[in-house]
Amino acid sequence: MINTNWYSIRALTLPATAIALLITFFIVWLILRLQFSKKWSEAYSDAAFTFILVWKFSLLVTDFKSVVAQPISLLYFNGGTVGVFLGVIAASLQVWRKRHKLSLQGHHIMAYSWAIILTQSIYQWLVVLFNDNSTTSEVTTLMVLSVLTVFILWKMQGGVKRGLILYTAGLIIVAFFQPLGIGQTAVGMSLLLLCLGIVLEQEERIKVGG
């Protein structure tokens, strides 16, 4: 979806997409805290914080000269699309490093599935609400992702891989109806998270089988 609105918080002006992401992190953290064990909400908040830090300071990678010339630019700018991918990779590596502590089996593997799918869905819903895009793209996004989210989280409880594959496929279909198409950042992020989910589940199956 295209960002069409900006919001001011004192001297800081943020795009609607950034506000949507911050609210999403809080809502998903709260859901995990209420639905699963405390360690999952803590792991999620750590990953979200890592994402924000890397995304924000990735400006050092994408525009180092400007940061050196004006260090204060770190407060107002970020690394853009490159920063988002770096943030997702960093957060994913953090989850990978903590995988043994999280014990990704049974109830716990469901927590991971909830975290990944809810983060993407709630973010998409809020972006629709906070911005003004075409009616077709907004209605398609809300309806398809709502149905997918409910179906996967409450009906498909047989593993992360199947749920994430179905969700990612649905998100790609939705992206066709959105202004930025399938080349948008959200699709790339979903594919990265899908890969991480598949790897984590496969490792746990090997561990249990062995």
Image (tube, helix red, strand yellow):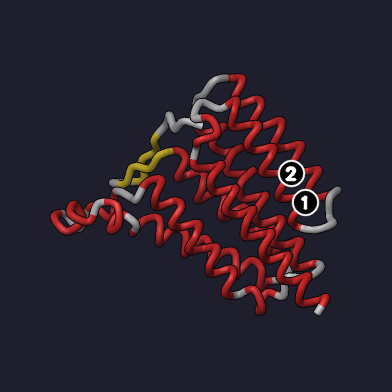
Is residue 58 depicted above or below 38 in this figure? above
Is 14 placed left or right of 19 in the picture? left
What residue lies at 13% left-to-right and 55% top-to-bottom? 69
Amino acid at circle 2: Leu
Q: Secondary structure at mark 1?
A: helix
Q: How many marks?
A: 2
Amino acid at circle 1: Arg
Give the residue pinned by disc 2: 166
Residue lying furthest left in this view?
69
On the image, which quarter does residue 201 sit in?
Answer: bottom right
On the image, which quarter does residue 125 sit in?
Answer: top right
Residue 104, given in percent of the width and then of the height, sits at 73, 70
What residue lies at 61% left-to-right and 46% top-to-bottom? 120
Residue 72, given in percent of the width and then of the height, sits at 21, 55
Q: Is residue 49 visible?
A: no
Residue lying furthest top in this view?
135
Is 146 placed left or right of 179 in the picture? right
On the image, which quarter does residue 44 sit in?
Answer: bottom right
Residue 138, given in percent of the width and then of the height, sits at 60, 26
Count residues near mark 1 (Cα–Cα under 10 Å), then give few for <14, some for 14-19, many for 20+.
Answer: some
Is 165 placed left or right of 64 in the picture? right
Q: Are marks 1 and 2 in contact (CB under 8 Å)?
A: yes
What residue lies at 80% left-to-right and 58% top-to-bottom? 159
Give the residue pinned by disc 1: 162
Residue 131, given in percent of the width and then of the height, sits at 49, 30
Count residues near mark 2 (Cα–Cα under 10 Å), then give few for <14, some for 14-19, many for 20+.
Answer: some
Q: Nearer the viewer, residue 179 or 23?
A: 179
| Image quadrant occupied by the C terminus | bottom right
Is residue 40 depicted above or below 193 in this figure? below
